[in-house]
Image: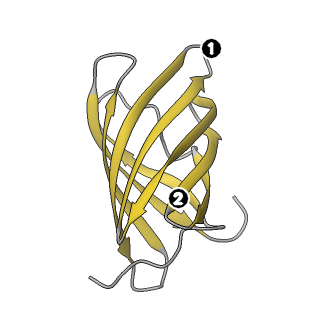
């Protein structure tokens, strides 16, 4: 696998999620990256407002996330992600996550989207 390009300025949406995850197809992430740091804002679907922050090492991201759900509850957790470059040049992220504020773990996939949402 070739090294994935920067995620800076790229927009991603949920493709799949397992367990009791709250990220879905309507959840959109706006990523930023600089000097080994990654962060994003996200919202949509079951998530009213979310933020993540972490680091990048090659094709892997490691971050913590916190969000407020549409029902008003807040949750936080951690995630390890492996980036994949698709044939068309977009990025797909394969994620393994765990809540820290409540029980639960799972796996999700988010994929870069282009054009209007």
Please give the name of the residue rendered at 48% of the width and 79% of the height, measured from the top-left corner.
Answer: 5
**Crowding at mark 1 (Cα within 10 Å: few <14, some 14-19, many 20+):** few
**Residue ID at (53%, 30%):** 66
Residue 56 picture quarter: bottom left
In this rendering, position of residue 13 left or right of residue 15: right
Nearest the eye: 100 or 113: 100
Q: Residue furthest front?
A: 35
In the picture, measured across the screen, residue 57 lies left or right of residue 11, that is left
Q: Provide the residue designation for mark 2.
A: 37
Q: Quadrant of the N terminus?
A: bottom left
Q: Is residue 2 left or right of residue 66?
A: left
Per the image, the residue denoted by label 1 is: 72
Q: Secondary structure at mark 2?
A: strand
Residue 63 coordinates in the image, percent (x, y): 43, 46
Q: Is residue 90 above or below residue 22?
A: below
Position of the C terminus, as image quadrant, is bottom right
33 or 71, nearer to the observer: 33
x then y, percent, for residue 104: 28, 24
Residue 90 versus residue 34 in the image, above or below: below
Seen from the viewer's position, the closer of residues 40 and 69 is: 40
Q: Residue at the location (62% across, 21% down)?
A: 70
Which comes before the other along the chain, label 2 or label 1? 2
Q: Comparing marks 2 and 1, which lies closer to the viewer?
A: 2
């Amino acid at each position: 696998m070739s090294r994935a390009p920067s995620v800076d300025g790229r927009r991603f949406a949920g493709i799949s999620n397992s367990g009791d995850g709250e990220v879905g197809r309507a959840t959109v992430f706006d990523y930023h990256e600089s000097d080994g740091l990654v962060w994003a804002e996200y919202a949509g679907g079951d998530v009213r407002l979310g933020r993540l922050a972490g680091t990048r090492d090659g094709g892997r991201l490691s971050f913590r996330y916190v969000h407020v759900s549409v029902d008003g509850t807040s949750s936080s957790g951690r995630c390890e992600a492996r980036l994949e470059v698709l044939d068309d040049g977009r990025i797909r992220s394969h994620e393994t996550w765990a809540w820290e504020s409540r029980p639960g773990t799972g796996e999700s996939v988010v994929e870069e989207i282009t054009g209007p949402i």
